Image (cartoon, helix red, strand yellow):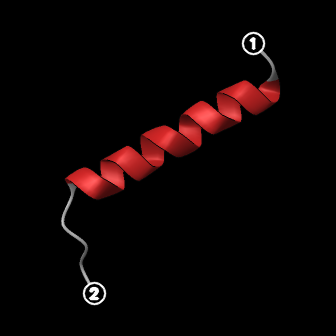
Amino acid sequence: PSRISIARLLIENFINKQQTQPTKT
């Protein structure tokens, strides 16, 4: 697994967490 792979995983996880939580504006 390359750094890019890990970074992509982190980004995907972050987006997933944001989607689960309601967006507070």
In this picture, residue 8 sits left or right of residue 22: right
**Disc 1 to disc 2: CB gap under 8 Å:** no
Quadrant of image for the C terminus? bottom left
User: Which of label 1 and label 2 is nearer to you?
Assistant: 1
Residue 22 to residue 9: above or below:
below
In this picture, residue 15 sits left or right of residue 6: left
From the image, tell me which residue sits under label 2: 25
SS class, disc 2: loop
From the image, tell me which residue sits under label 1: 1
> Which kind of residue does numbered mark 2 sit on?
Thr
- Residue 15: x, y in percent? 43, 51
Residue 25 to residue 16: above or below:
below
Q: Indicate which disc, 1 or 2, sits on the residue closer to the N terminus.
A: 1
- Residue 10: x, y in percent? 56, 37
> Which kind of residue does numbered mark 1 sit on?
Pro
Residue 8 is drawn in which quadrant? top right
Residue 20 to residue 3: above or below:
below
Q: For marks 1 and 2, give the CA distance.
A: 36 Å
At a point 71% along the width and 26% down the height, the residue shown is: 5
Q: Residue 22 carries which label?
A: none
At a point 24% along the width and 78% down the height, the residue shown is: 24
Mark 1, Cα crowd under 10 Å, few <14 / some 14-19 / many 20+, is: few
Which residue is outermost to the top?
Answer: 1
Residue 15 to residue 7: above or below:
below
Mark 2, Cα crowd under 10 Å, few <14 / some 14-19 / many 20+, is: few
Quadrant of image for the N terminus? top right
Residue 23 is drawn in which quadrant? bottom left
Number of numbered discs overlaid on the protein picture: 2
At a point 78% along the width and 32% down the height, the residue shown is: 4
In this picture, residue 7 sits left or right of residue 21: right
